[in-house]
Image: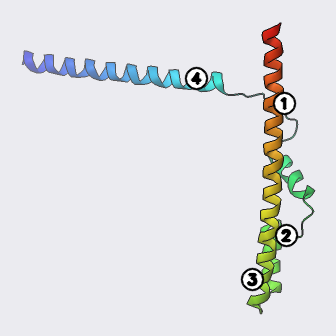
Amino acid sequence: MINLISTTISHISSLLKGLQIKSFLAIVIVGFLVLTTNFAPGQSSTGLKERVREQIQQDDSQRPRTIGEWNKEARETEGSPGKRLQKIGEESAEAFKQFGSGYVEGAQKTASDVGDSAARTGEKILN
């Protein structure tokens, strides 16, 4: 009987130690994420939906922007699969061209930001 109680107590004790270690590691990971994440709540006055909508409206391409426009275009070319495939090909080419230009702009901006950051760091070191 004493052996059973002793075994139960040691099992519960080891379980609690395991839980303490797991909770400690969880707290450390969450703390690390909170401290290293760059979050500025007042930085943007417009929400993500509005910014995405502005970006979509800013695009002057003739490609369909919404599911409704896509379905309308599909109904217009319903009888001729060749014409539909041609339109899809043209729109895909335009999308790839637009994606490529966005990628180049993003890479240039990132390179510029890295250069500016390096210059500021160099100035701080000299001061």
Q: Secondary structure at mark 2?
A: loop
- Nearest the eye: 34 or 61: 61
Q: Secondary structure at mark 4?
A: helix
Q: Which callout, 1 or 3, points at the residue further toward the start of the chain?
A: 1
Q: Which callout, 3 or 4, points at the residue further toward the start of the chain?
A: 4
Give the Cα separation between the discs numbered 1 and 3: 44 Å
Residue at 83% from the left image edge and 72% from the top image edge = 69
Give the Cα separation between the discs numbered 1 and 2: 32 Å
Q: Which residue, given by chain and number where applicable, does mark 1 sit on? A: 43
Report x, y in % for residue 43: 84, 30
Report x, y in % for residue 19: 37, 23
Q: Which callout, 3 or 2, points at the residue further toward the start of the chain?
A: 2
Amino acid type shown at disc 4: Phe
Q: Which callout, 4 or 1, points at the residue further toward the start of the chain?
A: 4
Amino acid type shown at disc 1: Gln
Instruction: Judge depth for marks 1 and 3 and give the one in front.
Output: 3
Report x, y in % for residue 11: 22, 22
Specify the quadrant of the image occupied by residue 111: top right
Q: Which residue, given by chain and number where applicable, does mark 3 sit on? A: 85
Q: Which residue, given by chain and number where applicable, does mark 2 sit on? A: 63
Amino acid type shown at disc 3: Leu
Q: Which callout, 1 or 2, points at the residue further toward the start of the chain?
A: 1
